[in-house]
Image (tube, rainbow, N blue to C red):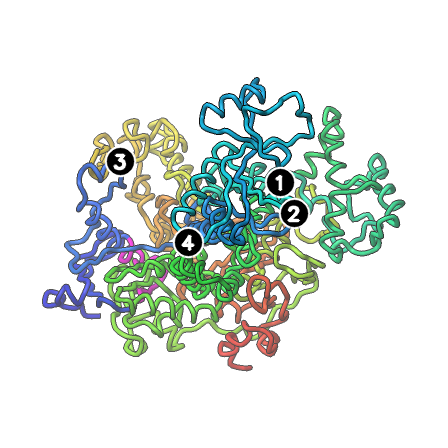
Amino acid sequence: MKTPDISQLNPKDYIIVKGARQHNLKNIDVAIPRNKLVVITGLSGSGKSSLAFDTIFAEGQRLYVESLSAYARQFLGRLEKPKVDYIKGLSPAIAIEQKVLAKNPRSTVGTITEIYDYLKLLYARIGQTISPISGQVVKKQSVTDVVNYVLNLPVNTKCYITCNIILPEKRTLEKHLEILSTQGFSRVLVNNIVTKISELNFNQLNKKSEVLLLVDRFTVQPADDTFSHRIADSTQTAFIEGKNTCLLITEPTDDTFKTQVFSNLFELDGMLFEEPDLNFFSFNNPIGACKRCEGYGSILGIDADLIIPNKNLSVFEKAIICWNSYKQDYFQNQFIKNAHHFNFPIHKPIKDLSSKEYQLLWDGNNHFTGLTGFFKQIEKESYKMIHRLILSRYRGKTACPECRGSRLRKDTNYVKINGKCLSDIVLLEVTEVYAFFQNLELNDFETKIAKRILIEINNRLTFLINVGLGYLTLNRVANTLSGGESQRINLSTSLGSSLVGSLYILDEPSIGLHARDTENLIKVLRELQQLGNTVIVVEHDEDMMLHADEIIDIGPMAGHLGGSLVFQGNHKQLLQSKNSITAAYLTHKQSIEVPTKRRTWTNSIQITNCNEHNLKNVTVEFPLGVLCCISGVSGSGKSTLVSKVLYTQIKKQLDGSSTSHFKQSVIKQLEFVDQNPIGKSTRSNPATYTKAYDDIRTLFGNLPLSKNKGFTASHFSFNTPGGRCPNCDGEGIITVEMQFMANVELPCEECKGQKFINDVLEVKYKDHNIFDILNLTVDEAILLFGDKTVESNRIINKLIPLQKVGLGYVHLGQSSNSLSGGEAQRVKLASFLIAGNNEGHTLFIFDEPTTGLHFHDVAKLLKSFDELLKFGHSIILIEHHLEVLKFADWIIDMGPEGGKNGGYVVATGTPETVVKNKQSVTGQYLKCKLKTV
């Protein structure tokens, strides 16, 4: 494609990037139209993220930081200038990446979206404290309440404003009244009879005598300022002397005195309540945090799933396995023998028990010791080895029983709005919370206070629902979210801020989204753009490209073969492009073909009656020896079924720690391939992870010059002393810290950035020293070691799998922390391909392996899966990508919706079978990919 002339463009209309050379970008010029939805696409490793994040966003962030004072900059990150000539027309940039937002266990969906902050404010301002004894609203009475009460009495009613006489420590009544008389008080009320203090006979008083301090007496008059002020002054005095309590006594008309008690304490029914404020509802504050779990929502306690692993069994069928041993069966027999006394259904499966019946199992009663009591007895005798073993076997991280996992102190449950406390709200799904606030009934006073707060709450809830996260609860811990979920929460937060004139850069926001949910995401992005922002999306999704205003295709290939501007224009123009691989797949000139024949299976693993999280008594069969895909809308229960149930049960069995009824004998090895980095150290790289570097070092150690110098394979390692540069310890760079500016990384003066000492660098293989080898891409290394010797064949056999999974562009020595999640996942896949069939029948579980993959890379990935299956292994994918689903041998579709409306198996079978199922949302979208249907 011809490079556009950007010198004549107006920076007010375009973001102009001149001479971008970051990473593999080849000095490209790009003009991005402002206030548009722009998609940057291309093969994995072609340079998309280098342009969007490492160039455009990095420069925007750097310019912002440099605009601050030197004092402020010392507290912020130090940023380097990207390799670019200049960028004009740059707006304030906000990057929304695929990263978990917070690792703090106290951070939740509610806190990171700020919804919880508004909920705290709402409950602190209009929440009503309800007494658990009488169900009445607790109110703090004031002087005004007393004045209003008196003014509503009939005129000429005789009243006494009194208070209890509070005796200080070690002071008699006589002495205290003497002191009160010096303060101006002259009378008391003894058994409702007015008596002067000076005339009081203390010898006639007994324990039954009621002595009250008389503050004021009057007859009720028509309301006027003078009379109201008198009542107010007297009441205030009574509150002070009576320690927050005032007694108003009216003289009888029917021979009985009437006493009305007023208290300016927050109490009712003999209970003193905490006055609601922001700290009272904060689980990050010692005032509001649950006293047992300290605001974490979970404790190390007895894990119910370990005690009752099979909830389809009844108590009579020995569902409670901790009571099954010969030494503990006393508790089982005790329960069964006494069950008729309290009508407990001992033959009913645990899963069918009512909440009251299930709680009784734990709490016990007069007839039997519950599970809680059982474990308390075990803990008392923990000096015995057998009891310590029992405790260790059944302990785990469980929801705090005191706060139900809501993290708040127990008495916050007394504060309610429309019958729900804050703990109830945070445990609901976002969609349910939204419905609650839509139907909220408030009086005029409450409406005036809550109006602004409710607008903020409802807006944020709406944004969460629009980005497909309505199935989450506000109490969901942030570090349990996937990268895609975290990104979409960040996106909803950005929408809530309503910024205009900004630049938003998103990294594949469609990750983890079903095809149906992607439509809602596009609407959200369009809304963000229509506010007056420029939205740049790094994306491979076909629908996203279809709805974009501008598409930028980077390529043509990956790594050193990419980094060029292949195409820029709209979707229609892209379809006519002859140089774009993206266009070739969109026009079906290249495609992932539907298999002519599906693999059949005989062995399988069955999970029965599973009720984990939102799964609803699911029974499902996972076929082995085939490519099995688990699909469904976001939050439908896919990850729960595969990661929490299937993977956990097989792993426990293989480790020999399984206590459940789950048994299988086919799987010998289990591998869960996620997108976590392949190594935490900067020294980790693809060559070391795949063990190819071990063979490379051996090859160099066997060269004639190495033997002459006395070098072994260890001399060619940058991780151990000997051959590496002692000045930089094999890093190749020296980092110089700058107080107010970015750290300066300089090549090591000793080794000139080559990591090794000169004697080691003199050893060469085909004119390449060990440092040159590390700088080769996988493709280049395969060509270099193609001489078919025994040693080079070992190296090539470990590099070809990297090429097969589409990582031929990656450098052998590229730091693992610079790899994306998808790239890290494919490096792991390559390592398994290298292992081949050496490990026995292995079940591979992949969590969205198409993350970050172009259509062309997906085709390579599927070929790699074919190889694993040919070795006799089994593959289970959690996946949304329609190109992968159409290639699968078997699909298990979860749904029909997310959250509480999900958790069912909607359809199972081949793709052709699933598309015929009208209940399957996945089937409706998959239909267009299967031409024969």
Apparent side of residue 55 relative to residue 88 in the rendered image (left or right): right
Find the distance from the CA under tag 1 to the CA under tag 4: 39 Å
* Residue that label 4 marks: 113
Query: Which residue occupies 56% across, 19% down?
Result: 171
User: CA gap, disc 3 to disc 2?
Assistant: 71 Å
Amino acid at pointer 4:
Thr
Q: Earlier in the sequence, mark 3 or mark 1?
A: 1
**Nearest-to-viewer mark from 1 and 4:** 1
Residue 312 located left or right of residue 342: left
For mark 2, what is the residue?
133
Say which residue label 3 marks.
Answer: 733
Residue at the farthest top position: 170
Instruction: Tell me which numbered mark, 4 or 2, is placed earlier along the sequence.
Output: 4
* Range drawn in magenta: 38-53
Provide residue 808's location: percent of width, then percent of height. 38, 55
- Do callouts 2 and 1 mark residues in contact (Cβ within 8 Å)? yes
Give the mark, 1 or 4, whose residue is nearer the N terminus.
4
- Where is residue 529? Give x, y as percent: 30, 67
Task: Indicate which disc residue 270 carries.
Answer: 1
**Is 604 on the left-hand or right-hand side of 170?**
right
Q: Earlier in the sequence, mark 4 or mark 3?
A: 4
Look at 76% across and 36% down and name the residue there: 374
